Amino acid sequence: MGKNNSGTRRIQPILWISTLYFAMGVPFVTINAVSGIMYKDMGVSDSQITFWTALIMFSWTLKPLWSPFLEIYKTKKFFVVVTQFAIGILFALIALSLPLHDFFKYSIALFAVVAFCGATHDVVADGTYIGFLSNKEQARYIGWQGAFYNLAKIISSGALVYVAGVLEKTKGVTNAWMIIMVIYALLFFALAAYHYLILPKEEKNQKDEKTAGNVRQELWEVITSFFTKKKILWCILFIILYRFAEGFAIKIAPLFFKAPRTSGGLGLSTSDIGLIYGTYGSAAFILGSVLAGYFISARGLKRSLIWLCCAFNIPFVVYALLAYYQPVDLLPVGIAVVVEYFGYGFGFVGLMLYMMQQIAPGKHKTAHYAFATGIMNLGVMIPGMFSGMISDWIGYKMFFIWVLIATIPAFLVTLFVPFPYSENQKEEPIINK
């Protein structure tokens, strides 16, 4: 522990960065991936699962619109603790809703509120990270931030899905998932209590006195300045289409794994899916992300981007091969997921870096980056909403062929995407309208 400017003992940042970003990752992964497996186990159709679990992710797209208002009332620590405690209550209510006749209607509504709380938590968590760490510390801990966010993926879509699969054999499907939701609830109650005790307190002079009118004016300035940036429409098209095919594939792949072989699926158990995605897949994703950083630093983003796009989109071919051959052994399925997730991690870094370097720079850098990530999520959400409807209509084999066709716009837009800023010069645009 060190001391801050007031002379009081300062808690080591890693003690709260690790848990804060783990808490950030859990709601997103649970709604985006785990809930789909749960609903598939409980007999909900693919079209319903994909449409509603994608639609309620809209909160992560809209979060920049209410984020400035959080600065008016209370502190970042207050909102971190309150949102985590609220998420705990909501997971407990989801557990209670699962035995009901209309469980899907009630539980998806509760998941929608989890999404709102999770998106709000993202805003205040990032604000805490930026506000309490120096630039040097931000750079020092950025790797830990990503590592613990990905740990949420390993725990949620890996360990807990695996446990659900084991419990299904003795407790039944509904009771198994009720237990998992209760575990989520207890986890967030513990996180809320921990962060109440350990998160740094904001000094009074750290908090600007703002009115709702000031914030509305600021928000309007942020929005207008974003949409008048150089070449912004082309940039938006790029961040939407880069992940277009993924929006279809990511929702259907685990449902395809779970579906019976007679329906064109692979007939895997819930625990098998948890093992494959949460361990091998997540490890491959992290490895791909790390290697991509070295690749870009050696070649530069502009020269690397088309290769990153290839790495991101071409591996979706593995799902088409799995749908065609329907292997019985788990090994080829595991290899396919490792290939796809490695490419996912490798290619995803390029998109994030493009938004940081070519869209965010300017007076409202943080807010504009939030807008860019929100639009990016929208680009995944929309195809995800209709992926189940399409797969129900044409079957899994043809669906994954469609996914490969859907990668074509990503390659076209990447070839011609503008670079308004030099990679060595962040603030002055080098391209005119």
Image (tube, rainbow, N blue to C red):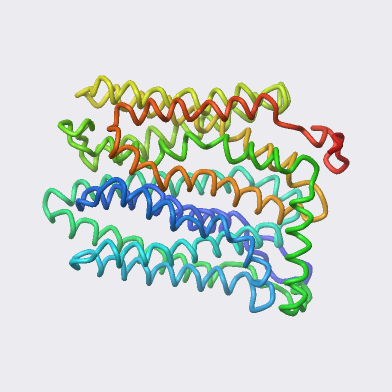
* Residue at 58% in and 55% down: 17
The front one of 252 and 155 is: 252
Q: How many marks?
A: 0
Q: What is the x, y in percent for residue 63?
A: 59, 61
Say which quadrant the N terminus sits in: bottom right
Say which quadrant the C terminus sits in: top right
With 160 as the anchor, is 289 left or right in this view? right
- In this view, which residue lies farthest toward the left? 170
Q: What is the x, y in percent for residue 370?
A: 65, 53
With 183 as the anchor, is 68 left or right in this view? right
Image: 425 above or below 401 = below
Q: What is the x, y in percent for residue 99?
A: 18, 65
The front one of 152 and 194 is: 152
Image: 137 above or below 213 = above
- In this view, which residue lies farthest toward the front? 393
With 64 as the anchor, is 18 left or right in this view? left
Image: 223 above or below 350 = below
Q: What is the x, y in percent for residue 174?
A: 18, 58
* Residue at 63% in and 29% down: 413
